[in-house]
Structures are given as C-alpha cells and as structure tokens.
Image (cartoon, rainbow, N blue to C red):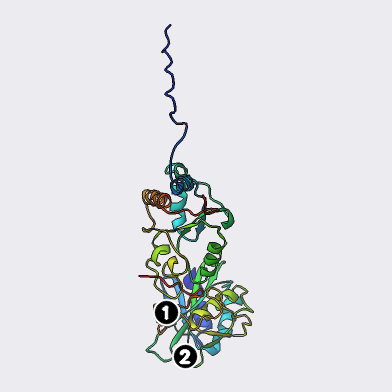
Amino acid sequence: MSEALFEQVREHLAGVAQDAAVMHGVLALRIEPAHLLEVVRALKDQFGFDMFLDVTAVDWPEREPRFDVVWHFYSTRHFVRVRVKTRVPLADPTVETLVPFYGSARYMERECHEMYGIVFRGNADLRPILLYEGFEGHPLRKDYPKQKEQPLVPYRDVKP
Amino acid sequence: MTTQPSRPAPAGAFEYLTTKKDEFVGWARKFSLFPYPFVTACCAMEFMSVSSTLYDTDRFGAALPRFTPRQSDLLMVVGTVTHKQAPILKKVYEQMCEPKWVIAFGVCATSGGFYQNYAALPGIDKIIPVDLYIPGCPPRPEMVIDGIMKLQDKIAAERHPIINEKF
C-alpha cells in the first residue's frame, strides 16, 4: 500500500527530488530550496499528505551549505509519512514559508527560527516563542557556547 | 463497684510556664507553615505524594497550600526554573510577607541539576535566598519530611523580632 504510493510520489517528483529513498518506512526526499513550494503542493494536493508534523533544522558546522532544513508530513488517508530535506547556507539561511498550505506551520517555523536562525520568507510573525525577547544568538547552533546564559533577573551576590 | 480515689491536683502545676519569647514564637511558627507550591516540573509528582495521605505533611503543620503568595510563609520551589520563568519566581518571592522561608525542592531548583545550558537557571539561589535544599531527582518523601523537620529546627532556633522592641 505505502510502497505503491511512494513509487507514485517518486515518479511524479523525479525531476526535482534527488536520491529519494525509503528509510524506516518514511519516504525521504532531498530537494533544492527553490523547488520547495512545488514539491509541497504536489504532496498535499495530489498525494494526500494533509498534516504538517514538524519543521526543524540540522547544523553541520564543517559543511557548506551549512544547514539542513527538514520537514515531515503525514497522510491521514494512507497513514504514512514523508520527509523533505533541503540545504541552505549560513550567509542566506532562507526558505519559503509553508503557512499558506498548513496553518500549523506558523508556530513551528517560529521555533525553528529562534533555535537555528532559519528565515521563513513570508511568515510575518517570527517572534521568539520558547525563548524571550532580547535573547541573542541561536542556541541550537553548534557554535553557541554550551553554558552561555542570558539571565533576565540579575544574579545575587552570593557569599561563598 | 469501687472507684479510684481522686487525687488532689498538685498545687501550682501547669498554672504558668516560663519560656523565652523567641522560643515561644518559634514554637508557634514552626507548626503553622503555609506552603506556596511553585511547581514547575516532574518533582510535582513527588510533592503530591509527600503531601497526601501516606506521608502526610499535615503532621508538621505544613499541609494546607495557599495559592497566593500573600497568605503563605513557605515558598516551595518544586522543579526546574528557566530563565524565562525567573522574573515570575522573583515576583512571587517579593510578594510574600515576612517572615518567609524558601525550600529548594529537588536538584533542579537546588543547582540546575543536569541542565547546564542556555535555558535553565542554575539554582534558584542565584536570584532569591534559600533556607533549605532538598537534593534528589526527585527526592524521596522521607527526604522531604526530613527537610521540613530541619526547617522547623531552624525556625525554632532563630530570632523572631516582632511588633515592638519591648516584647
């Protein structure tokens, strides 16, 4: 059942998705950032991936382009998942927003933005959601110092 | 049927006691702790366990939680406090009336525990004074009871300056 669907997706997206493979029951597609909207529109409208699960990023400090942006979608009709990956460089970590397709992308893109500094073009509200106003830097990037704190309340003078 | 002959009460017994003011006030205060549970994380389960029937902190006069800081005198910080929550904790502490005591319940409130990163406050004593630390992840109820008893000892032993200097 899911193999047949995956095969259809692979054929349909053969031009834009490189090395599509099934891993652990999830179809993984790697695409160029420019093809994102086209791929997501096909997945949603033609193949029934109607649920937006998550968007996150992976930081590869040694690599260029440095970041992977990873989306997961779920089909409530076929009960299968698909993973879409793309690469963006540190100089311009920008991808298109998916809010016009999936309203729930709004919050997850905010989280990905504050944690990794990925910019979602078209998402008007990229305020911090888990962090606070005034936090500098992106704490899940590998070059953020592990124990660097940015306290909101000044610390007391504690006698040793 | 015979009855025990009633003994005349010894004259003067328990008609008055002598004590020191601080000891008297400390004795009264140590059995009337009104905790404010500032509960943020998984230690809450252990807090529920210790305050319910089996372990029963009511035995120490510390059972009735007040959910407003203005009516409480014991702040129990139960669980991890993040930097984002720290201003709230500080405000709650400042809203409490004197006399007030603070217990850091669990290792996260004590020192941040295994959270050493951008998000977690490394111990609530960085922002408010703490009277008693209860380590453990989470602490056993016995440790909490031991902690409450130690706090009672501390309250009983400390100075209690109240209303005017003559008393």
The numbered mark 1 sits on a residue in which chain? A
Where does the image place residue A40, in percent across and percent down from the top left? 57, 80
Question: Mark 1 is on which residue type?
Answer: Lys
Q: Do the dots labelled 1 and 2 sit on one chain?
A: yes
- Marking on residue A148: 1
Q: Tell me whether the residue at label 1 lies in contact with that at label 2, contact meaning CB atoms closer than 8 angstroms.
A: no
Q: Amino acid under label 2? A: Leu
Asked where in the image residue B18 lies, by quadrant, the reply is top left
Q: CA distance from mark 1 to mark 2?
A: 21 Å
Residue A56 versus residue B135: which sits nearer the camera?
B135
Numbered disc 1: secondary structure:
loop
Residue corresponding to mark 2: A90
In the rendered image of this protein, does residue A120 appear above or below residue B33? Answer: below
The quarter of the image holding the C terminus of chain A is bottom left
Q: Nearer the viewer, residue A96 or B139?
A: B139
Q: Which mark is residue A140?
A: none
Residue at 39%, 50% (x, y): give it: B153
Query: Which residue of the protein is positioned furthest toward the top in this rendering?
Result: B1
| Residue in the picture at 43% in, 63% down | B109
Q: Residues within 10 Å of mark 2 (few under 14, many from 20)?
A: some
The x, y position of residue B63, in whole percent, is: 50, 46
Q: Nearer the viewer, mark 1 or mark 2?
A: 1
Q: Earlier in the sequence, mark 1 or mark 2?
A: 2
- How far from the left and from the top, in percent, is residue B143? 36, 51
Vertically, is A117 above or below B36?
Answer: below
